[in-house]
Amino acid sequence: MPQLATSSILERSNVTISGVSGPNTQAIVFLHGLGGDQNDWRLVAPAFENQYQVVLLDLIGAGKSDLNAYTPTTHGTLNGHASDLLDVLGALALHDVVFVGHSVAAMIGVIAAVHEPQRFSKMVLVSPSPRFINDHGYAGGFEQKDITELLAAMEADYNGWSHGFAPVMMGANESPELVMALTNSFIRTNPEIVKHFARVTFFSDTRTELGFLTIPTLIVQSAHDVIAPLAVGHYINEQLADSRINVIETGGHCPHLSAPQKTLRAIADFLHHETQLG
C-alpha cells in the first residue's frame, strides 16, 4: 500500500500507537463505543504497553477522527465501520491481533473478524449486544417503542438527552466524575453524527455473524447493565464456537471505566489462558 494511502488511513481514524514495537510483537487493538473515543480506554490500555503494541483508534465520526469521512451511506450499517477497522489493520500490516471492543464496537470487531479472520487471534467483547430489540424469544433489553422514544429524545434535545443517558450507561452508583466525563464525551461529538450512529447501532442485528466467528473470544459482562443485560452476554456465549464469559460485579454498560481493575484481570486471565493452550 502506498505510504500516502497508509498515512491517510491512520489519520482518518486518529490512530495512536504505544507499547512494545518490533516485528514479532503482537498488537492489541482497542475500539470504543457510541458517544466515546479512544480515551475511554485510559484506565485499561496502558496496562498492556509492556507486552503488546497498543493500538488505539477513533471510530470515524468520533473523537479526533476525520469527521468529513463519515457519510450516511458508507456508515449506514456497521459494515462500514468494520471496513474502517480492517483498513487500519491493513495499513499497519497487522495480523493475529488481540481485539478489544466495547458495546457496538465489539460487534464491529465481530463483523471484521468474520470477513478477515487472519487479522485476529483473540477477541474481547466488552458489554456486547448483537441486537438491542427483543425479538421472538430473544431478549435484547428493549422493545421497539423504547428505541423509538430514545431516538426521538435525542432529536428533541441532544444535550438534555446526553445528561440523562450518560448516568444510565455508566451506572447510577458510579462517581460523578465518570458520569460527567461520559456526558462531556457525548456533547463534544458532532450531534448529527451521534444521532445517525445511534440509529444504526440500536437497529442493528448481527446475530447471524456470531455463527461464523471461530476465534477464541472473551465476553466481559457487567452484572447490572440495562443497555446490554446479562441475558445478552449469555446468549452470545452460547452462540459462539469458542468463547467464555466473565461477569463483573459492577453496574452500568462500561465496566472498563466503572471497574477497570476487574476488567483488566478478566482480559489478562483470558489472554494467559489462551496462550497456555496455544
Image: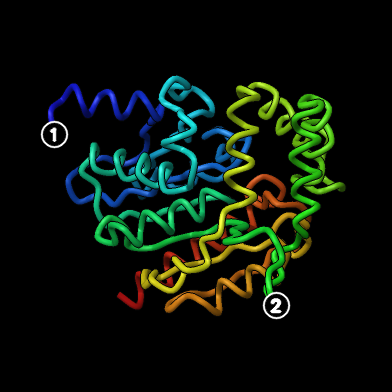
Residue at image coords 48%, 59%: 124
Q: At 78% from the left edge and 55% from the top edge, which residue is drawn?
A: 251
Where residue 218 appears, as percent x and y from the top left, is 50, 67
Q: Position of residue 134 (x, y in %)?
A: 71, 66
The part of the image, by quadrant, that contains residue 227 is bottom right
Q: Which residue is mark 2?
A: 137
- SS type, badge 1: loop
Circle nearer the viewer, 2 or 1: 2
Q: Residues within 10 Å of mark 1 (few under 14, many from 20)?
A: few
Identify which residue, 180 or 3, lies in the foreground.
Answer: 3
- On screen, 258 above or below 17? below
| Residue located 69% across and 64% down the image | 140
Q: How many marks?
A: 2
**On the image, which quarter does residue 221 sit in?**
bottom right
Q: Residue at x 77, y 31 (%)?
A: 162
Q: Dividing the picture into quarters, in which one does residue 8 lie? A: top left
Q: Quadrant of the C terminus?
A: bottom left
Position of 96 compared to 39: left or right? left
Name the amino acid, label 2: Gly
Residue type highlighted by circle 1: Met
User: Against 217, is 46 above or below?
Assistant: above
Q: Which residue is mark 1?
A: 1
Q: Position of residue 272 (x, y in %)?
A: 42, 67
Q: Which quadrant of the rendered structure holds the N terminus?
A: top left
